[in-house]
Image (cartoon, rainbow, N blue to C red):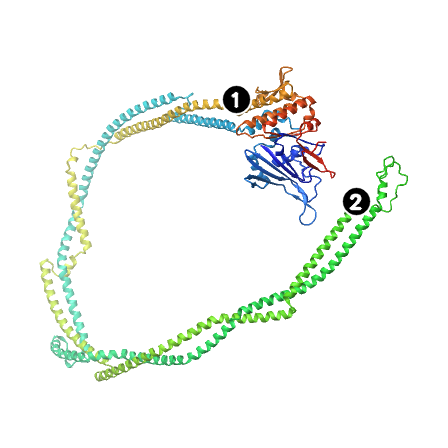
Amino acid sequence: MKIQRLRLAGFGPYKTEQIVDFERFDADGIFLITGKTGAGKSSILDAICFALYDQVPRFLDGKQPLRSDYCEPDDPTFVELDFSLRGREYRLLRSPAYERAKKNGTGTTTAAPTAVLQVLHGTEWQGLAAKPHAVGLELSAILPLKADQFLQVILLAQNRFQYFLLAKTDERRAVLRTLFGTTRFEQLETALVQRRKSLDDRLADVQRDIVEHTTAAMHQLRLSEPPIAPDLGWFQGALADLNSAVDAAAEESASAAALLSEATADHRAATETQRRQGRRALADTALATLDGRRAEVEEERSTLLRAARAARVWPHIRSSRAATADWQAALAAETLARVAWLPFGDSSAGVSGSTAQSESEPALRPIMDALVRRLGALAEVLAEEKQLPALNHEITALFDVLTGHTDGLTRAQNRIDELPQQIDFVGEQLAAATLAASGETDADDAVCRSDAAFTAAENVVSLQTELAGAGVQLLDRSRDNAAAAVDYEALVARRFAGQASELASRLVDGVPCPVCGSVEHPAPAAAEGEQVTAADLDSAQLQMQGRQRELADAQETQASLTNRLGQAQALAGQRSVDELRAEGVAARVRLATARTAADLVGGLRQENADLRDAQAHARAAVVSLRAARDTAADTHSERSGQRDLLVARVGAQRGDRDTVTDQARALQHELDCARALDDALVLSQQRAAARDAADLDLASQLAEQAFDDEETAAAARRGERQTAQLANDVRSYDDQRAAALAAAADPELIDLAPDPVDLEPSRLAFAAASGARDDAVGAHSSLAERAGQLDVLVRGVTTRFAASADLLDEHSQVQGLADVVQGDEPNTKRMRLETYVLAAQLEEIVVAANLRLRTMTSGRYALEHDDSRVKGGARSGLGLAIRDEFTGRARATHSLSGGETFLASLALALGLAEVVTGQAGGITLDTLFVDEGFGSLDSETLETAMSTLDTLRAGGRTIGLISHVDSMKEQIPATLRISVTDQGYSRIEANAPVE
């Protein structure tokens, strides 16, 4: 890392902008920062640290009075630092929070802290971050050194020079880790620890699985006490024992099954014998019962035979009765037909009996034929009469259509006559509306102009009032300004007049007068009135300045109002508000009229087009209606002639009836009565013959079935349901008796023991054998299932034991390696891997530092790397000790004197810079600052230290030294001189002559 350029202002003792170009000292390699005490030498280092870390070495407690006390409220405060790192150039601009003047109004406000980080690309600076937090994040990635580490290796600030020399192991480790980038070794340690923890978890999982398998095996083996350290042999032995128990249970199950088979056969034979004895008993009981019902069944059998004979006679009885009833009904119908024919018949119509029937039948035939002929003659006229209503309706409808066409023709002709006038009227309205609508744009512009002029006229009135008030205010502010100026001039005059008395008030006897130098003051000037102080003048001046600003504001307000009034008057012209209001109303009326006309133009155009279309349609309608009217008139005349012809024919055929239909209806009624009487006579003759035949058939059937008369046969008859019931009863009895006789003769029931069989002994033997068989099968199934589950457990635990062996092997190796790299046993040094690597780097640093420390101490002192264990078991490996060649012993670095500590710290810092620069991937330390410490050296040691520093010029490194030692000023020609101005603030001069 190389510090290239520093620019600051308003920081510490520096009020004005100061620029330090550190690259101008590259050729010299060493430069001296010198100046009076308190001039601001260390403030340069403070500015560098503030730019990088937003803090300064001397104010790490958080209280940072960074802004210069010499700054005015408007003066800025900032620090800008240019530095290079790993081949890239960066620019960092940072400012703290401070009180600045408000942009508007008086007083101050707190300016927020700012920070901007840029990187150089070619010749242009490009931003990386623009807020303090974002800049901090970017810098932590670019520059991994923390603030305290930066102060130990690059910027050796006052009172912090010896920190790296006297630091504890952890503090020194943090600095070296950042410089040499050894976090990868820490990551390796972490990875090994994580690997060991992962193996611990996996090994614990395996052990947990084995314990769970042991618990499951105990459950299958029904063990209450867990085994001691069960291994794979225990699991395999337990499985073999359980398999033996399964084989024994299988033999017991087979034996119990054989005994159950014998008991089942015995119980089945006894049950069969009991069943056969029961069948025999049932057959004997059934025969006895059937013999007791025999007489009753024979009586039912006789009744059933009589009913069968009656059933064969019954259809003839029913036919005879039906024929008699039909003959009587035919006689009644004949009587009714004769009564109906009386109005149309002769004297023989009233005769009854077969004689009358035979005499009237031939007489009815001619009458019916004549009636038929007359009805045939009326059929055609009747059809024509039925057409008359429809024809009358058609004639009426044709008349209505003719009337409608005539009226429509009249209306269409009237419409044709009216349309030309309407078309002309709408055309005139359309022309007028189009002309009025064309002025809409002019009317709209007129409204806008009148509104603007009206608003301007109103503004003229209000602005005149405001301008009058502004004039009064300007006059008041002018008077106040003049009064303030007079008061200030009076105070100045009084101040000058009272100078003598003010000087006299500070004279002290024995002290020389600052004017004449006399130590005696015989006649000091007396004060006249109250003295005017500098504060009074400042207050009066501020008041005068305030009045001047108020006067300027009043003048600006009056000028603005005057300008606005002129613009408003130009826009309003010479017209009043009322005149402009009237113009606006008239313009709006014209605009409304134009917009109304514009709205009407479209409607009028459409109306004009509609009227022309209506005219064409009306002309076409006249032609169509005239043709339709003529057609309707011709059809009406034709239908009226047809109706007159039909009316004449119907009148000739209706006789004395109102209509031909009534005449045909009367003739049809007479014909129907004649036909009814003729049919009734024929039917009565037929029914009498059928009755006589049925009576002869019935008498023959009664004699055949051995019945005396019709009543006896009817009494023997039974209903269908009753007959079926009697037949079922008889048949059931016969079937039951036959079944009982067959059962009694069954060979299985012969030679059976008379005493009943007892089933209880065989049932008990069967139940006992069945229970024994079930117990044996259940025990065998349970043992077989447990053996199967135990077999699965044994296979699983075999895999777990194999896995645990491999894991134990790997875990032992990883744990040993992790313990070593973490500094645990067997690492006797208790030195971690990263510490071991850093210890090697520290040894190189010590070697490089001793090359200079031995020279600067004339070979007396040398640094030693101390890797011995510390008390309390803390980590070791990065300790430092100082070896005193006078005593031949090493001792703690804290035992060195102030000068010795400075030399050792300087040598260590130079060695650290040299080793870091030579390492690939580390941070190159191209710039080093040392703040004070040289004053603690004697002249000879100082000369040696300067010679050592002078050798660094050839290494391309630049070292800045801050010191008051005069001999250093003589030896180092390149200087930054900090001088204090007469106003009290400081400035920086490069290569200025050293006083």
Q: Position of residue 594 (x, y in %)?
A: 53, 71
Residue pictured at 34% horizontal, 22% vertical? 241
Residues 720 and 84: in front is 84
Direction from residue 847 to residue 534 in the image, left or right: right
Q: Is residue 760 left or right of residue 127?
A: left
In this view, the residue in front, 810 or 850, is: 850
Task: Look at 69% across and 59% down and name the residue there.
Answer: 559
Position above or below: 718 against 921: below
Foreground mark, 2 or 1, reads: 2
Marks counted in the figure total 2
> Is 663 in front, or is 433?
433
Instruction: Decide if residue 17 is on the left or right side of residue 757.
Output: right
Q: Is residue 406 visible?
A: yes
Using the image, determine if residue 863 lies above or below residue 336. above
Q: Quadrant of residue 476?
A: bottom right
Q: Position of residue 40 (x, y in %)?
A: 69, 34
Quadrant assignment for the C terminus: top right
Q: Is residue 201 above or below residue 858?
A: below
Q: Quadrant of the N terminus?
A: top right
Q: Secondary structure at mark 1?
A: loop
Residue 678: x percent and y percent?
A: 15, 75
Dot 2 lies on which element?
A: helix
| Residue hosting label 2 | 534
Q: Position of residue 665 (x, y in %)?
A: 22, 78
Amino acid type of the residue that numbered disc 2 sits on in the rendered structure: Ala
Residue type, numbered disc 1: Asp
- At horizontal 48% and vertical 28% (from top left) the residue drawn is 191
- Looking at the image, residue 749 sits to the left or right of residue 127; the answer is left
Gap in angstroms between the C-alphas marked 2 and 1: 77 Å
Residue behind mark 1: 824
Tell me if label 2 and label 1 are in contact, CB under 8 Å.
no
